C-alpha cells in the first residue's frame, strides 16, 4: 500500500488531492469532500495555477445560498471559457470542471475532432429551487451553487457540439458527448444526461453532492 501511495496517490483514500495527478480511484470522493473546507479548495486551485475570484457569500434562509463560491477567470492553467460569462459555482464544482477539462474534455476533443474546446456553453449554476423546479421535495444542488448544467461545446475551429442536437445517432459528435459524460462520472457526485430523462434532453447536469465523499455516485 505504501508503494501505491507513492506511485499513484490518487488511488489511495488518505493521500491529499493533487490536481496535477491523473484521475484516480478516489479523486471524485476527495473533490466532493472539499465542500467542507473552502480554504483547502482555494489552495488547490492556486497551487495548480488556476486563476479564480472568490465570490461574496449568498446568504438566504432555508436551503439556499452558498459561502464557498468561486469564478474561474481567464489567463490561468485552464483554457476553456464559459458562455454566458461569468460562471460562478461552489469551489468543488470548479475543481471538478478544471480536472474534467484537462483529463477528459480536451483529450476527447483531440481524439474525435483534432481540435481543442475553447468554450463551454452552460445554463448556469446557482438557482434557489427544489429538484426539477417542484414546489416540494428535495432541494436541488443548484440551490447551493453545487451544480452546473452544460449545454454545448465550441471548438477552436468554430464547430459546435450541442447536447440537444448531437446526443443521439452515430458519428464523432455523439461519441464525444458520451465520452465527456462518462468521464465526468469519475469526477462528480452526480452526472445526468439525456439518457436519464426528458428534463435533461438539452444538458449535462454535473454536481458535487456531499454523498460523493462516501463513494455514492449517480451516472445516468
Image (cartoon, helix red, strand yellow):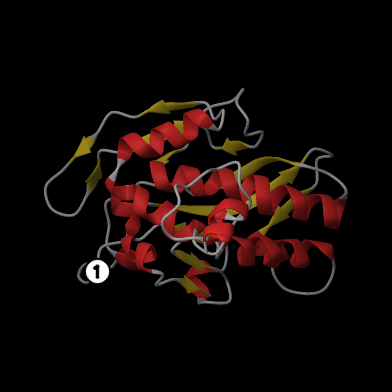
Residue placed most toward the observer, 98 or 112: 98
**54 versus 95 height, above or below:** above
Question: Which residue is pictured at 22% across the width and 50% down the height?
Answer: 64
Q: Position of residue 53 (x, y in %)?
A: 42, 25
Residue, far right: 114
Residue 81 appearing in the image:
yes
174 relative to 123 in the view: left or right: right
Secondary structure, mark 1, is loop
Quadrant for residue 134, please give it.
bottom left
Residue placed most toward the observer, 31 or 52: 31
Q: Position of residue 89 (x, y in %)?
A: 40, 42
Q: Position of residue 18 (x, y in %)?
A: 52, 43
Question: Which residue is pictured at 60% across the width and 41% down the height?
Answer: 20
Residue placed most toward the observer, 17 or 174: 17
Question: Which residue is pictured at 50% across the width and 68% down the height?
Answer: 192
The residue identified by callout 1 is 138
Residue, far front: 2
Amino acid at each position: 500500500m505504501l508503494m501505491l501511495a507513492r506511485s499513484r496517490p490518487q488511488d489511495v483514500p488518505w493521500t491529499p488531492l493533487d490536481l496535477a495527478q491523473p484521475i484516480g480511484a478516489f479523486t471524485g470522493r476527495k473533490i466532493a469532500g472539499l465542500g467542507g473546507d473552502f480554504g483547502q479548495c482555494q489552495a488547490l486551485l492556486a497551487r495548480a495555477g488556476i486563476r479564480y475570484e472568490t465570490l461574496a457569500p449568498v446568504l438566504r434562509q432555508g436551503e439556499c445560498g452558498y459561502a464557498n463560491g468561486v469564478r474561474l477567470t481567464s489567463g490561468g492553467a485552464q483554457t476553456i471559457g464559459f458562455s454566458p460569462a461569468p460562471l460562478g459555482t461552489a469551489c468543488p464544482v470548479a475543481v471538478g470542471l478544471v480536472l474534467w477539462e484537462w483529463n477528459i474534455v480536451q483529450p476527447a476533443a483531440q481524439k474525435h475532432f483534432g481540435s481543442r474546446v475553447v468554450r463551454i456553453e452552460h445554463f448556469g449554476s446557482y438557482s434557489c429551487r427544489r429538484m426539477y423546479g417542484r414546489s416540494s421535495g428535495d432541494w436541488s444542488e443548484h440551490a447551493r451553487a453545487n451544480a452546473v448544467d452544460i449545454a454545448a461545446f465550441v471548438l477552436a475551429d468554430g464547430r459546435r457540439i450541442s447536447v440537444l442536437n448531437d446526443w443521439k445517432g452515430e458519428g464523432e459528435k455523439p461519441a464525444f458527448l458520451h465520452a465527456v459524460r462518462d468521464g465526468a462520472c469519475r469526477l462528480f457526485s452526480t452526472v445526468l444526461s439525456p439518457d436519464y430523462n426528458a428534463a435533461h434532453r438539452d444538458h449535462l447536469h454535473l454536481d458535487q453532492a456531499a454523498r460523493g465523499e462516501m463513494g455514492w455516485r449517480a451516472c445516468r
